[in-house]
Image (cartoon, rainbow, N blue to C red):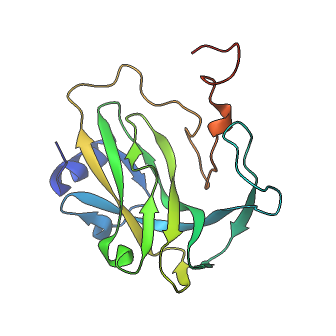
Amino acid sequence: MILSDSTIRSLLDEGVLRVDPLADHQIQPASVDCTLGRHFLKIDDSQRTHLDLDQPIPYRDIEADTIVIPPQSFLLATTNEYIALPNHVTAFVEGRSSIGRMGLFIQNAGWVDAGFEGRITLELFNANSLPIELRAGRRICQLVFCLMDCPSNKPYRGKYYKQIQSVGSRISDDTENKPGVHS
């Protein structure tokens, strides 16, 4: 079940759900708008000829109020908002329609697990033929909250728990494909 604005407000007021900072105008009929932070990561393609899922990926850190994403380029960004989900609520990250209509695709793998806490790392891709300039503080995406049928027995405490900046892929930390390691 997708949560309405009134349920979102109740959970925020009760301290069950946390979105900080949060202005009243960010709460929409069935979502909460999140704003763009100042921290970005760009894959450092000068160090590699390809990316390997078993090796750490090199990134360049960028702190800026404004950033330009060239055409057909990928960038990681973060939200200003720090969120904390209870063990019975999950969230989808959706790009804003007005931004998508400019050719900017926004993801975070689309899903935030119950129990997650931290800022959301966003995956931005400029599908346009022109560069797109973004400014920190602008509404960039929305969180759609969903009530689970029961609280999670194993709330999220994974490798991105309590992240406060954009965090690059940590896929090389996955153990299921490493020799001699069994999950």
Q: Position of residue 119 (x, y in %)?
A: 52, 52
Image: 18 above or below 132: above
- Look at 56% across and 41% down and name the residue there: 162
Residue placed furthest toward the bottom: 130
Image: 26 above or below 49: below
- Look at 70% across and 50% down and name the residue there: 51
Image: 42 above or below 58: below
- Look at 40% across and 81% down and name the residue there: 102
Instruction: Specify the quadrant of the image occupied by residue 74.
Output: bottom right
- For this view, does 53 lie left or right of residue 151? right
- Look at 34% across and 69% down and name the residue there: 96
The C terminus is located in which quarter? top right
171 or 98: which is nearer to us?
Answer: 171
Q: How many marks?
A: 0
The N terminus is located in which quarter? top left
Residue 35 visible in the snapshot: yes
Instruction: Specify the quadrant of the image occupied by residue 104.
Output: bottom left
Q: Position of residue 139 (x, y in %)?
A: 41, 72
- For this view, does 51 lie left or right of residue 82? right
